[in-house]
Image (cartoon, rainbow, N blue to C red):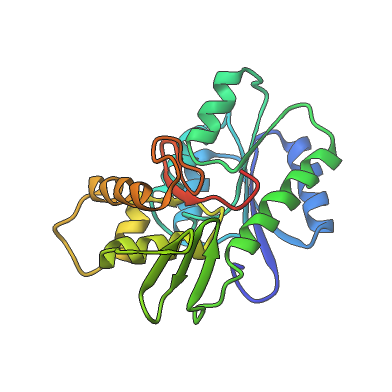
């Protein structure tokens, strides 16, 4: 969580009446709600302050929600924060665009409060589950893959496989945060922090190698998934 036991949500919506309604119900759900009605101001806040949830309207003055979401996923305090996109647009292409920008879920106006809060509960529950593993966890089992960090051993369907340091570290990071989308920049920072001669294409190359080693079908992966336009995640069991 952002801090202590209080969950903090950023509500970015330029319709005042809707914003007040959403703020009220988020408050009932236990969130401390920070409000913004302008995309650029929201992005400035997102770069400096960690949140546990972002509710983000697509049509905003200053900078639209798609741009805000893409920017927050590229780096800063909220690269993995759950984002629910809120919009009056209901075309399939608009939904895809919102999800490709890095949103975790998408709700179309007009919507019922129950539907909204159900979606909020779902994305925050998945996020909490993805972050549930404490820092000292040394063994993980996801799908067909078992990982032992202390021995730096990996097995797939019971057979040991050889992984480079970067391959193992990247796989362990994603597996320990199942369902959480990491941008390429974030993965570079966390896995290659001491190497200044790598680029985001390096992440793509290592993911490709990992898929060949751990997936039943590397061309149709079920474990290491692409979050289009953002980065990668490990399947959380509901994908």
Residue 20 coordinates in the image, percent (x, y): 78, 44
Q: Is residue 106 visible?
A: yes
Quarter occupied by the N terminus: bottom right
The residue shown at (66%, 61%) is 8
Residue 21 coordinates in the image, percent (x, y): 81, 42
The residue shown at (68%, 24%) is 88
The residue shown at (42%, 42%) is 230
Q: Is residue 56 above or below residue 196?
A: above
Residue 55 coordinates in the image, percent (x, y): 64, 45
Instruction: Say how many tags the image has.
Output: 0
Q: Is residue 136 above or below residue 211?
A: below
Quarter assignment of residue 218:
top left
Question: Among all residues in the image, which is located at the extreme front?
Answer: 159
Of 26 and 103, the residue lying toward us: 103
> In screen coordinates, is 28 left or right of 213?
right
Q: Is residue 62 visible?
A: no
Q: Is residue 97 above or below residue 207?
A: above
> In screen coordinates, is 151 left or right of 28?
left
Quarter assignment of residue 156:
bottom left
Residue 201 coordinates in the image, percent (x, y): 24, 45
> In screen coordinates, is 163 left or right of 80?
left
């Amino acid at each position: 969580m952002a801090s202590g036991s209080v969950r903090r949500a950023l509500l970015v919506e330029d319709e005042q009446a809707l914003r007040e309604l959403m703020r009220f119900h988020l408050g009932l759900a236990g969130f401390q709600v920070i409000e913004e009605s302008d995309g650029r101001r929201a992005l400035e806040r997102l770069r400096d302050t960690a949140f546990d949830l972002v509710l983000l309207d697509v049509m905003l003055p200053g900078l639209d929600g798609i741009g805000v979401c893409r920017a927050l996923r590229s780096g800063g305090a909220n690269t993995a924060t759950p984002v629910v996109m809120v919009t009056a647009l209901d075309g399939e292409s608009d939904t895809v665009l919102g999800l490709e920008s890095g949103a975790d879920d998408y709700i179309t106006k007009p919507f019922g409060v129950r539907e909204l809060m159900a979606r909020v509960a779902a994305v925050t529950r998945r996020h909490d589950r993805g972050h549930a593993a404490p820092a000292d966890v040394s063994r993980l089992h996801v799908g067909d893959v078992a990982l032992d960090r202390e021995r730096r051993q990996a097995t797939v369907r019971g057979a040991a496989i050889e992984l480079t340091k970067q391959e193992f570290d990247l796989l362990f990071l994603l597996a320990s945060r199942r369902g959480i989308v990491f941008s390429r920049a974030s993965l570079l920072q966390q896995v290659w922090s001491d190497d200044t001669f790598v680029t985001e294409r390096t992440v793509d190359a290592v993911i490709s190698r990992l898929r060949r080693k751990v997936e039943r079908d590397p061309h149709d992966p079920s474990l290491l998934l692409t979050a289009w336009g953002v980065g990668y995640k490990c399947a959380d069991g509901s994908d």
